Image (cartoon, rainbow, N blue to C red):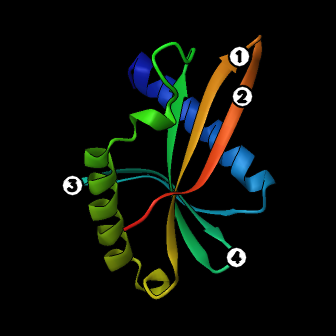
Amino acid sequence: MTGAAAAGSDWERRAESFLRNQGLRPLARNFSCRLGELDLILLDGGCVVFTEVRYRRDTRHGTGAETVTPAKQQRLLRTARVWLQRHRRHARLPCRFDVVSMCHRNGSLEVDWIRNAFTA
């Protein structure tokens, strides 16, 4: 695993831990297919939550959430459809797309959890 991939995996684990503490239950991490990758897939009650994790060292050039462009959103939507086709027991549940954006500010980690960041 390269340095960037290892760092990304670390931030995904931190985001997963944060979301677990909020009551969500992990279903999968780093699901990928030819259409894209989903960082985290969790269950929030009866709702499947596809979560994109973004980290920025600082926000001078925007937040991590601002980097989830419409093109990225479309890749996430297509990839989520594939995951749901492969996991039929979750296919009838409501779904949402969240973004967990993290950055360091004033020496501490700041986590911004954006529920329903975009819709299908």
Label 1: element kind: strand
Label 3: element kind: loop
Between marks 3 and 2 in the image, the one whose residue lies nearer the viewer? 2
- Do the numbered discs 3 and 2 sit on residues whose CB atoms are within 8 Å? no
What amino acid is at disc 1?
A: Arg
- Residue at 39% across / 41% down in the picture? 68
Q: Which residue is mark 2?
A: 110
How many angstroms separate mark 2 from mark 4 (CA)? 25 Å
- Do the numbered discs 2 and 1 sit on residues whose CB atoms are within 8 Å? yes
Between marks 3 and 1 in the image, the one whose residue lies nearer the viewer? 1
Q: Earlier in the sequence, mark 4 or mark 3?
A: 3
Q: Earlier in the sequence, mark 3 or mark 1?
A: 3
How many angstroms separate mark 3 from mark 2 (CA)? 31 Å
Task: Note whether 48 is above or below 72 in the view shown.
Answer: below
Label 2: element kind: strand
Q: Which residue is mark 3?
A: 35
Label 4: element kind: loop
What amino acid is at disc 4?
A: Gly
Task: Note whether 60 is above or below 113 in the view shown.
Answer: above
